[in-house]
């Protein structure tokens, strides 16, 4: 068995709140924040509840998935103007079918500390192709380095992890890399503790990592990630149920639970500044 902690702090856990995503709707859960003011308010409440990072998507006026730059700009400005020190992680996918320019512009111009980097193409939810072709990944990685934005490398299956290692070798991704292990998306690996352990054991030694499970696998992955010394992502992007049959009241309800559970096992929720240190982000 390999050691599984990698570079993660052993006594702190970075909690990321994935507030909105591209798939879930207010019909699935009315608490889903979809417009800039709602998303910014949710980000601040999640930070108050213990999240060090917020992962942000935006929606169009009709709440459909979007990469509209003005929506990102308004959301980011509202959070920054509030003086909330939460670390911003902007999506670089935002849904399906967006142009390379639409996907890159938000992190390039707004310069969050983190942005998602999806390390490969996959069949998404048995419906469409989630395109992340090699030339896009090369451009995306290069633009992140140029903008001083750290990639959060999203891994949906083991092939993506191999792809990420290739780009690390090529210098498109820099070490120490930060990984988000995304389990339970139809088309990717299932949300099981076994799959999480398998991925963790194949991560590069010199990295940090977090994990989340989608839908009903979310609790299993959150608890397994905590046990392995990993960081945890929760939120309405990934799961609209707090427990089976019980819809979540808010994003911060998930954050508060992970903070409580982690504390019971001697792991404190990292502040945003502590997370900056663990992730090697420039202040
Ligand atoms: Zn996302």
Image (tube, helix red, strand yellow):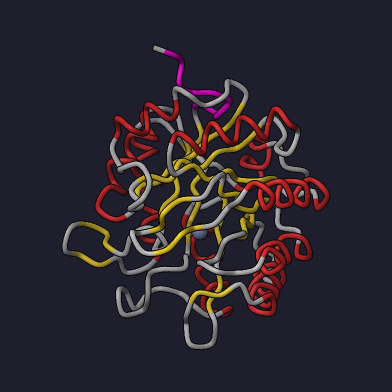
| Residue 136, above or below 278 | below
Q: Where does the image place residue 120, in percent across and percent down from the top left?
A: 54, 46
In the image, residue 161 lies in the stretch drawn in magenta: no
The quadrant holding residue 282 is top right
Q: Is residue 215 left or right of residue 173?
A: left
Read off the magenta span: 2-10
Residue drawn at point x = 72 percent, y = 72 percent = 81
The quadrant holding residue 253 is bottom left
Q: Quadrant location of the N terminus?
A: top left
In the image, residue 9 lies in the stretch drawn in magenta: yes
Most extreme residue toward the bottom is 62
Which residue is nearer to you in this view: 71 or 184? 184
| Residue 123, above or below 279 | below
Most extreme residue toward the left is 245
Magenta residues, dominant SS class? loop
Which residue is nearer to you in this view: 44 or 133? 133
């Amino acid at each position: 068995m390999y050691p599984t902690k990698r570079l993660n702090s052993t006594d702190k856990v970075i909690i990321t709140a994935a507030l909105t995503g591209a798939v879930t709707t207010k019909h699935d859960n009315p608490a889903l924040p979809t417009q800039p003011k709602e998303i910014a308010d949710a980000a601040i409440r999640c930070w108050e509840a213990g999240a060090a990072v917020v992962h942000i998507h935006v929606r169009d006026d009709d709440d459909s998935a979007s990469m509209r730059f003005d929506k990102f700009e308004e959301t980011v400005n509202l959070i920054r103007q509030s003086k909330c020190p939460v670390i911003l992680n902007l999506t670089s996918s935002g849904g399906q079918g967006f142009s390379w320019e639409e996907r890159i512009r938000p992190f390039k111009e707004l310069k969050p500390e983190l942005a998602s980097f999806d390390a490969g193409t996959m069949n998404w939810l048995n419906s469409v192709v989630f395109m992340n072709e090699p030339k896009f990944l090369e451009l995306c990685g290069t633009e992140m380095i140029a903008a001083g934005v750290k990639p959060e490398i999203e891994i949906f299956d083991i092939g993506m992890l191999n792809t990420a290692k290739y780009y690390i070798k090529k210098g498109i991704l820099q070490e120490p890399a930060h990984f988000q292990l995304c389990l339970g998306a139809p088309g990717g690996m299932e949300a099981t503790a076994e799959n999480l352990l398998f991925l963790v054991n194949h991560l590069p030694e010199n990295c940090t990592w977090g994990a989340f499970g989608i839908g009903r696998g979310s609790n299993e992955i959150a608890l397994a990630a905590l046990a392995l010394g990993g960081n945890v992502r929760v939120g309405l992007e990934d799961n609209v149920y707090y427990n089976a049959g019980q819809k979540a009241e808010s994003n911060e309800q998930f954050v508060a639970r992970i903070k409580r559970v982690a504390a019971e096992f001697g792991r404190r929720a990292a502040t945003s500044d502590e997370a900056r240190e663990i992730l090697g982000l420039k202040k």
